Amino acid sequence: MTSSVMRRNEQLTLHDERFEKFYEQYDDDEIGALDNAELEGSIQVDSSRLEEVLNDYYKEKAENCVKLSTLEPFEDQDLPANELDGSEEEETVTVALEEVKEKWDCESICSTYSNLYNHPQIIKYEPKPKQIRISSKTGIPLHVLPQKGFTAKQVERMQMINGSDLPKVSAQPRSKNESKEDKRARKQAIREERKERRVEKKANKLAFKLEKRRQEKELLNLKKNVEGLKL
């Protein structure tokens, strides 16, 4: 933006008036180069004027220069006498310099990249939670409810088992002089014991089956009660 385009205030107006008065002192014929004045020209290389200028230049430079032959040895008065003589041998000491390295830790490095929106920190390992397994029969999560122990009937049945309930005939040693009647009676007793054991095994199997159904039924009722509470 030029001064002619700018908005004129008091200072700019005063400046313009002074410039106009100063410009009135010069006519058109007084502006420009003077008449009969050589503003441009050339000079010969072997000109005496050029030689005089060069001689003046060399003389000025020579005044600031000192020849080596005129220099004198310099002695420092502050140095000790033994150092000036140089009679004693200088002791050389080898010093190992270690390169200084910047020491950073994880927190300092993270702090250099922290700002208003970025807060870096050390990544923490969090184990994945275990998947919840659901029973295919009851639909209740497994290993959530407390495990029930033995019932009173089961404990009573286990306490009733003692040495008299175990088969004794099959555990007795067989005599070498056993007669045919004794052998027949022993085998019959073994068959009776095995039959009793099969009946007892079947009864126990049926009892455990009924107990399992009863517990599953209780879990199913508990699941229904929980769903009713959620609703």
Image: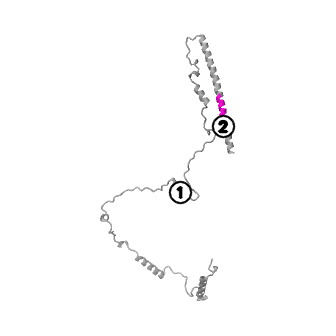
What is the count of numbered marks? 2
Q: Which element type, helix, strand or loop, lies under badge 2?
A: helix
3 vs 103: above or below: below
First in residue order: circle 2 vs circle 1: 1
- Relative to residue 105, is residue 78 drawn left or right? left
Q: Does the CB distance between marks 2 and 1 fall below 8 Å?
A: no
76 vs 157: above or below: below
Is any atom of residue 31 visible in this view? no
Is any atom of residue 197 visible in this view? yes
The Cα–Cα distance between marks 2 and 1, rounded to whole angstroms, is 55 Å
User: In this figure, which residue is indicated by the disc labeled 2?
Assistant: 219
The picture quadrant where one finds residue 110 is bottom right
Judge by depth and name the residue closer to the eye, 94 or 89. 94
Where does the magenta region start and end?
207-217
Q: Which label sits on residue 111?
A: 1
> Residue visible at 58% across and 25% down?
160
Q: Is residue 210 magenta?
A: yes
Q: Residues within 10 Å of mark 2 (few under 14, many from 20)?
A: some
Judge by depth and name the residue closer to the eye, 189 or 151. 151
Q: Quadrant of the C terminus?
A: top right
Q: Is residue 79 magenta?
A: no
- Relative to residue 73, is residue 224 drawn left or right? right
Residue 52 image point, x, y percent: 45, 81
Q: Amino acid at mark 2?
A: Leu
Q: Amino acid at mark 1?
A: Ser
The picture quadrant where one finds residue 179 is top right
